[in-house]
Amino acid sequence: MYSFEKHIGSCIRVAKRETKRLFSNKIYVFCIFIVPLFSLFFFLSLMHEGLPADLPLALVDLDNSPSSRNLARQLDAFEGTQIVLRTSDFSKARENMQQGKIYGILLIPDNFSKDAVSGKQPKLSFYTNNSYLIAGSLLFKDLKTVSVLASAAVGLQTGRAKGYTDNQITTQIQPILIDTHLIGNPWLNYSVYLNNVILPGILQLMIFCVTVYSIGIEIKEHSKRKWLRAGDYSILTSLVGKLLPQTILFLISGLVIYVALYGMMGFPFNGSIFSMLLLLFLFVISSQAFGVLMIGILPTLRLGLSFACIWGMISFSISGFSFPVNAMYPFVQAVSNLFPLRHYFLIYVDQALNGRGMLYSWEHYIALAAFLILPVLVLKPLKFAMRHVKYEL
């Protein structure tokens, strides 16, 4: 009991020392509070409309008939599309796309209406600039939709001319009705899709960097012996005491993000509050544990921070929210489990979006908790570095 109380006292002593260092160094305040809160404001304001609207499009109408003009009005009425250039010169439209002024072109051929009524199957051509992935994809969807509508309108007009009823024509135009139900994000809101992972990912990156920096700076500034002395020369006690204030502050930043996303913005939240709070806690401490591993493997500030930045940036690509992990190479699929953000994303989908019970996500909760083993693997190398590594200025 005495030994346990002694370690608790040492841990508190180190935590008090670290708290003073946290608030006396602007780098900590910047990384723990300013970066996550600025990112929160920036990304939420950037995508406050949910989907990009009024994407610029060029219309090349070589037919200039009532039918082609009606088709143009239908396309311009779409929320995501705005016809900003009407011309009969395709070269001019192409030049505007190459200059980045427009993201798509709709080409209506000459004699479009006459050929459609006579059954000659005219072709509508549309071009999208997929160098801008989101803009190009959204315009492609609208252009494809309006082309289907145009085909249906022509079919309806031709059928009526042949004496068919509207019901008979409809079964020919659309023999199968599609009933679509979008789960989790029925509004196709890009803010919901992106910010629920980007913001925790930025928080994780800051946790990596702060953890590595707070330990590495002790080596660089030759204050490592004072730190170990405050922890009674126990590297484990010293680490716990150092990381405890950071854990509390990062949890506060994470709670602010949660309140903004699910409280103020009303993002989908179908699970329990406890499951998401547990997720946040495990996410923070698992990221800290990984940060200890980084500085333990590379016990110099420069190399440790490089490791933290690289691993944190790769997390955005390998977590699976932008490109499915199961479509990656098998080796990459296995490596993805070494990133805390990957498990955060899977739990978020199960809990917040789908509202499933915590039992369905148990393996990912355990995976996050398993990251706590990582610091144990580098305790001896880290303690050796504290005693013997001399930082060359």
Image (tube, rainbow, N blue to C red):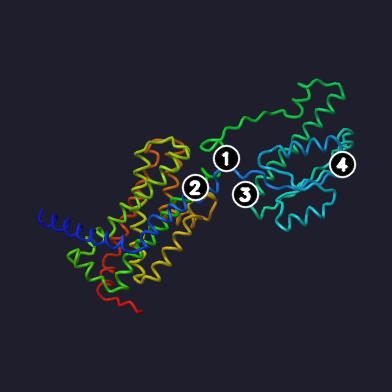
Q: Which mark is residue 134?
A: 3
Front position in the image: 155 or 44: 44
Kind of residue sitting beneath label 3: Ile
Kind of residue sitting beneath label 1: Leu
Q: Earlier in the sequence, mark 1 or mark 2?
A: 1
Q: CA distance from mark 2 to mark 3?
A: 15 Å
User: Contact (CB < 8 A) between labels 1 and 3?
Assistant: no
To which residue does mark 2 refer?
195
The spot of residue 164 in percent (x, y) is 83, 21
Q: At x 68% / y 42%, what residue is drawn?
A: 141
To which residue does mark 4 refer?
63
Q: How many marks?
A: 4
Q: Which mark is residue 228?
A: none
The spot of residue 389 in percent (x, y) is 29, 76
Kind of residue sitting beneath label 4: Asp
Instruction: Tell me the crowding category of disc 3: few under 14, some 14 to 19, or many 20 or more residues within 10 angstroms, Cα based.
Output: some
